[in-house]
Amino acid sequence: MAKLVYGLNQSLDGYVDHDKFMPEVALFRHFIEEVRGTTGMIYGRRMYEVMRYWDEDQPDWEAHEHEYAAAWRSKPKWVVSRSLTSVGPNATLVANDLETVVRRLKAELPGEMEVAGTELAQSLTNLGLIDAYQIYLHPVVLGSGKPFFAGPQPPLRLAASDRIVPNVIRLTYVPA
């Protein structure tokens, strides 16, 4: 049975912003290994559109970026959207009946599945489908932006804390 893990980079004041968290190489390598170890990804539309950047190699990429792109491309993706009519390679569009689709994926697939997108994660939380929340806490204060949690959460319990690189820790919470 697959475990759904919602994880994103977050500022000290609770915001996520992919433009403000360019990971250093060591953290990037951590994310490469995370992607390699995942069964697949479930994305909201906006996050999927951000991640489509990895679909095509860029001439200025360094080796670790090529490595990440290869790992990312190799994994199946499910994209939750009512507005998209198609998705890219190795991706499946989930236009309706989110709960049924995700419960089936959890029942049929092994390992961990990444969930990305604050609103999608809130919807899956409301359905009781998120198994763990991973906050990659960065020592910056943004002052505004999109919050990691898009709404109220059930009680959570700290399950683990890991220093990933000198300035970033990963906090893993599970439903209490």
Image: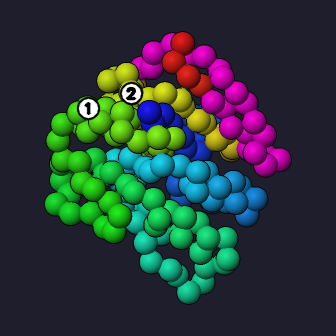
Q: Residue at x 59, y 75 (%)?
A: 66
Q: Residue furthest right?
A: 166
Mark 2 highlights which residue? 129
Image quadrant for the N terminus? top left
Snapshot quadrant of residue 84: bottom left
Residue range corresponding to the magenta coloring: 152-172
Q: N-terminal of the two: label 1 or label 2?
A: 1
On whether residue 167 falls in the magenta region, the answer is yes
Q: Position of residue 101 (x, y in %)?
A: 26, 39
Mark 1 highlights which residue? 99
Snapshot quadrant of residue 30: bottom right
Would you say the magenta stretch is mainly helix, strand or loop? Answer: strand
Indicate the amino acid at tag 2.
Leu
**Above or below, comparing residue 8 to residue 106 in the picture:** below
Q: Position of residue 49 (x, y in %)?
A: 36, 60
Indicate the amino acid at tag 1.
Glu
Q: Badges 1 and 2: C-beta atoms under 8 Å apart?
A: yes
Of 82 and 72, which appears nearest the observer?
72
Q: Residue at x 76, y 59 (%)?
A: 26
Can you see residue 6?
Answer: no
Density class for disc 1 (Cα within 10 Å; few <14, some 14-19, many ≥20) is some
Q: Residue at x 70, y 27 (%)?
A: 160
**Above or below, comparing residue 59 to residue 42 in the picture:** below
Disc 1 on helix, strand or loop? helix
